[in-house]
Image (spheres, rainbow, N blue to C red):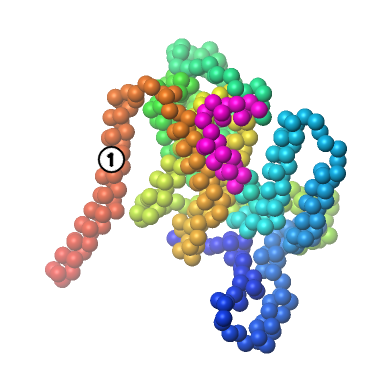
Amino acid sequence: MTTPQDPFLERSYTSSSSIYAQSPGSELDTPFLEKDIQQLQQQPDPAVEAVRKLTLPFLGPIVRPRTLTALTVLLLALLYVAVTPDIDSTETNVKLGITAAIACFVFIGMMQFRDGPFVRPHVAFWRAVLSLSVLYQMALVFFLFLNKHQARQMLKFVYPELGVPLPDRSYAEGCELTLDNLKNQIDIFVLAHVLGWYAKALILRDYWFCWILSIMFEVMEYSLQHQLANFAECWWDHWILDVLTCNWLGIYLGMKTCEYFEVKHYSWAGHMRHIKGIKGKAKRAVQQFTPHDWTRFEWKTTSSFKHWMAVIALLVVFLQCELNCFYLKFLVWIPPEHPLLTYRLILIFFFALPATREAYQYLVDKNTKRFGPHAWVILANIFTETLICIKYGRGEFPEPAPLAVVVFWIVFSSSLVLYTVWKFWWLPKTRKQKAGGAKKVE
């Protein structure tokens, strides 16, 4: 089933120059060409007009392309830096230079990157998100060329408190199911757990998808606790505190938020003066930071081989993204409470929102022939993180996987392959043969 495209997905990105781009030596009817170009120049840009209709009136001037103005502002800022007195501290200059380079790249991306699937609160915001995703990829590639000792020192340069080995901590001690043990496991990370699954529900927008991901992550913790000590937890910590409490609450609240946006009646007034009262105007201003519309994700996993493989791939990508966080902090010595991990999680959340929307559009809409830029870059992010974990993990995990884990994954993988063959090859073939036999009898 093909879902209707959102208004912002129907924009035309073709400019008058690209319409008439010809190979060298080709001949064009110049009078007609000039006339057509003049007509195109007189028409409003459909992309700009589409965004203007979905934006607060007083933000209208911001929506219009003002690339020369933006370039002037950027150059003036750089001029100010050039004429100000030098700072003697090399460390301070390097940190300020890196920060300014990041800001400069994001600013350029806001002006020049193409729009993504979202327009709220502003298309420039999501261009900035894409810019940060590209920058994150560049940083990951840089760290890929370092060894783990150099990476730890590099992070220590930015955060002096880092660079200290982490103590091994196991949560699989005192596993009697008592009220005191339950209370001892409740800390600030419980709230982080709930918020994390709330965010995943907003990204995936599907109950069963979130539940499968939740259960599979606990299975991954069981499978990898011989490598990471903090994956070792009591059975009730896995299934009662994590799956049935924190994960359930986060998924439930996230899906209720999705349902609210899905059924909510959106009434976007054309001008602030048409809205009566300060309360109404304030409400309209707040609505600028909510979705203009909401697409319900219907993954239809077993409807076709394409959907089946796409959903499995998406589950693998999500699980790998989760595991990367734990392996990276272990390998480069980042404590669980350090803000650097929080920054990464927030960035990944904003990267994944438009990326999953683009991936879904690519899966269900036959008219979408191109993988979106957000989805493209975040796949590169996750894959490069995985490569870093593999490179830095050499010699860190000498203990082999337990036999029970190996047997489980052999059985699980074999069952998955057999089901795929039965569902998408053997069953259709059998039905086709039966249908052919029935026609011959008739």
When the figure is inspected, residue 262 is found, relative to residue 161, above or below; the finding is below
x and y, in percent, of residue 172 in the image: 45, 16
Q: Main secondary structure of the magenta part?
A: helix
Which residue carries the number 1 mark?
415
Q: Is residue 292 visible?
A: no
The quarter of the image holding the C terminus is bottom left
Q: Which residue appears at 69% of the width and 69% of the height?
A: 45
* Quarter assignment of residue 141: top right
Q: Nearer the viewer, residue 418 or 112?
A: 112
When the figure is inspected, residue 64 is found, relative to residue 251, above or below; the finding is below
Amino acid type at image mark 1: Ser
Q: Is residue 142 magenta?
A: yes
x and y, in percent, of residue 389 in the image: 47, 33
Q: Is residue 72 visible?
A: yes
Q: Which residue appears at 59% of the width and 47% of the height?
A: 134
The quarter of the image holding the N terminus is bottom left
Q: Which residues are magenta?
A: 134-157
Q: Nearer the viewer, residue 157 or 103?
A: 157
* Quarter assignment of residue 236: top left
x and y, in percent, of residue 337 in the image: 61, 24
